[in-house]
Image (spheres, rainbow, N blue to C red):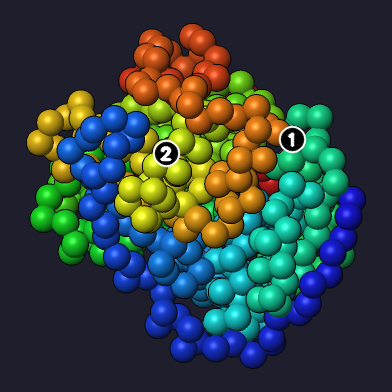
Amino acid sequence: MTTVVLGTARAAGNRDLLGLLGRTPLARVTVDLPGPQPGFWAKLEGFGVGGMKARAAVAMLLGARDRGELRPGAPVVESTSGTLGIGLAFAGQALGHPVVLVGDIELEPSMRQLLGSYGVRLELVDRPAAEGGWQAARLARLRELLTLLPDAYWPDQYNNPDNTAGYASLAAELTAQLGHLDVLVCSVGTGGHSAGLVGPLRRHWPGLRLIGVDATGSTIFGQPARPRLMRGLGSSIHPRNVAHGAFDEVHWVGPAEAVDACRRLARGAFVSGGWSTGAVALVSAWAARVHPGAVVATVFPDGPHRYLGSVFDDGFTTAHGIDPATAAVRPVEIPHPRAVEATGWVRCRSVTGPPATAPEQQP
């Protein structure tokens, strides 16, 4: 295990920062993905302070404070592949809590530097667990830290209902910005933003269809867990926040498809992002094509800057055997999530939850 100490957050909060949260723009995306498509709406959370997950981070810390689980000035400890870490850095500064994050050595150097610049203490595990991969290894180190920091609070983003509740503001913004919505496409990792959006939006538009977008190698929707190159979506564990019953269908997307979509977005629409953005853009364009006249919307969780050394780097993609030219142009449909192991773009209209024997993540 590698430990990197990059600074300490200010003990005093700055609640004025909370006024910067949200109110992100909505863009119309009509670029070919990979072929012509009538267009969809993308909520650009990368333009918000702290990115999309700042909404969840603030909600989780405020909820814990209200319940007395997080004492004033106490540290916050969480596992992250990066995006929630930025959100927690924002929430920690706003509310006056030092933040300790457990990442892994595959976390990009630029993200390590950025978290350090925000005053976060970062710990990196140096090997994946035999079962559960990097995610399980990070959680194991997190549990050790909780014994060393008895006053620390673990938000447990995978299972914390405040994660979901934090996206009420995002739902309200979409409702105000869109006159109508037929199809919502959401990437799924912790399950927070899909669950947090679909309830309020279906109360407003009862016929709304929800399409989940997962990564190949993720076990959220019944596929076997495998090592995953794509970060920000997918999981090697079974988060309780995922509202399996709310989804009408699920798509698994591979790295080649996500890279190709991200690069097409950057060249033709200017707005782009990382793995999650590419994956949801691809599926949103597909949904707009197969549902003529439907209003389709999705959420781009962050911008492209974190991914300049990966998604947008030819050396990286070549080293990892990713050729955007081989990206699928349409999904392969399977009858059940366990029928075939997805290695590229796969669609399934049968959505199932985790097996009853799936282990829960507890501190």
Number of labels in the image equals: 2
Give the residue pinned by disc 2. Answer: 261
| Amino acid identity at mark 1 | Gly
Answer with left or right where residue 76 lies relative to residue 354: right
- The residue drawn where x is 35% and y is 21% is 330
| Amino acid identity at mark 2 | Ala
- Element type at marker 1? helix
Q: Quadrant of residue 175?
A: bottom left
Asked if 268 appears above or below 45 in the picture, the reply is above
Dot 1 or dot 2, earlier in sequence: 1
- Could you tell me how far apart the alpha carbons at marks 1 and 2 are, in whole angstroms? 27 Å
- The residue drawn where x is 14% and y is 37% is 294
Say whether marks 1 and 2 touch (CB < 8 Å).
no
Q: Nearer the viewer, mark 1 or mark 2?
A: 2
Kindly tell me whether residue 163 is visible in this rendering.
no
Answer with left or right where residue 233 lies relative to residue 237: left
Answer with left or right where residue 102 lies relative to residue 179: right
Give the residue pinned by disc 1. Answer: 133
Classify 10 Å Cα crowding around label 2: few (below 14), some (14-19), many (20 and above). Answer: many
